[in-house]
Amino acid sequence: MSVWEINFKESKEVWDAFVSTSQQRSIFVYSKFLDSLNADYDLVTCCEKGKVVAGAVLIYSDAGELIDRPYPFTQYQGVLLADSASQSAHSQITHEFKVVEYFISQLTEHYTKCCLCQSWRLNDLRPFLWHNYHDPEKGQFKLDLRYTGILDLKKYDNFDAYLSSVRLCRRQEFKKSSQILKLEFSRDEAILDTLHAMTFERQSIERNNQDSVLVRSICKHAIAGEYGKMSVALLDEMPVSAVLFLYDDRTAYYLFGANDPAYRNTGAGSFLLLHMIKDAFEQGMEEIDFVGVNSPSRGDYKVSLNAELKNYLITSFACS
């Protein structure tokens, strides 16, 4: 008899309580954020002696099938583990390995496919690498390496100390833009959606109607639920840039940044982003997550703001 029990339909209350204590927690796995996606999902937990020791969220597409790639505009919806820092290092590694090994074996038996975007804080990926190691015909996980950027705010005494350490061109942009732009916080998700569409069009990226619905829903829920803030840069009272940050207890997430291409030379994007970083300092946040450093055109920009690279993996499984 197994020492672990699986619940494929965990309650939101139990789930959120577990998430709040996990080192792999993020805003993207709390039920309040998941509900903003307007998609069906399963909250799956693994319990040991009545305590949740592991969990994952599985999201369904509009067609009623589990998604086989990360859900748009989301991150870190992978395996979460209970905090076991009180154990010795070797005991913690061994226990967590066995828990994850069992947990993903149950997931792959219950679901024909799944996609888990792992937190960069999930260190031991061996259970995914070794799944069905001796029986590959039963299906194995595909691992896709990605990167995000983390700005550790604890390294700086205050925003001014931080600002003095970023790349010179960013400081120059901030100084110049601060002379011509005005910042305001807004609750109007239409501003972000409109500017987001302009940004995609400039980059020749197709943006469908579902993207628009999702951007608006995420923004609206985050602001109403008080786990998000949208700042807007105004030039002569006209919105030329918008940024949406999401928050949990320790991290501020730079989820959306959008600009009117006609006013890119104003430095509005840097103006807003640096102001939001300043706001994170003032809120007592521990870190900024730039939510991906996987684009050649955007990667260096985020690094120029002192983001440290952290790798994470997208692990996907499909029965053969």
Image (tube, rainbow, N blue to C red):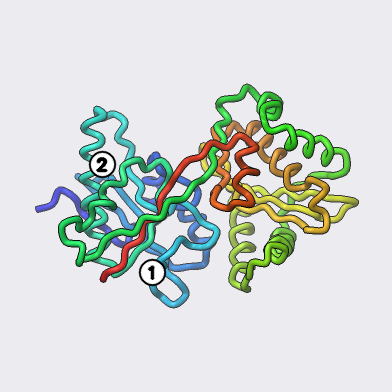
Residue beneath the point at 51% across and 56% down: 74
Report x, y in % for residue 140.
26, 61
Query: Quick check: 124 above or below 319?
Result: above
In depth, the one of 70 and 126 nearer the eye is 126
In depth, the one of 35 and 63 nearer the eye is 63
Label located before the other in sequence (2 or 1)? 1
Q: Which residue is mark 1?
A: 66
Q: Is residue 40 left or right of residue 109?
A: right
Q: Is residue 180 left or right of residue 89?
A: right
The residue lying furthest to the bottom in this view is 63
Report x, y in % for residue 261.
78, 58
The residue lying furthest to the right in this view is 236
Report x, y in % for residue 238.
85, 55
Q: Secondary structure at mark 2?
A: helix
Query: Quick check: 221 above or below 212?
Result: above
In depth, the one of 257 and 218 nearer the eye is 257
Q: Is residue 308 left or right of residue 281?
A: left
Report x, y in % for residue 315.
36, 56
Q: Amino acid at mark 1?
A: Leu
Q: Specify few, some or many for label 1: CA neighbours under 10 Å numbering under 14, 14-19, or 20 or more.
A: some
The residue lying furthest to the top in this view is 157
Residue beneath the point at 38% across and 61% down: 115
The image quarter containing residue 124 is top left
Residue beneath the point at 59% across and 31% down: 284
Label 2 – label 1 distance at C-alpha: 26 Å
Q: Where is the C terminus found, in terms of image quarters?
A: bottom left
Residue beneath the point at 33% across and 44% down: 81
Q: Which residue is mark 2?
A: 96
| Residue 295 visible in the current orientation | yes
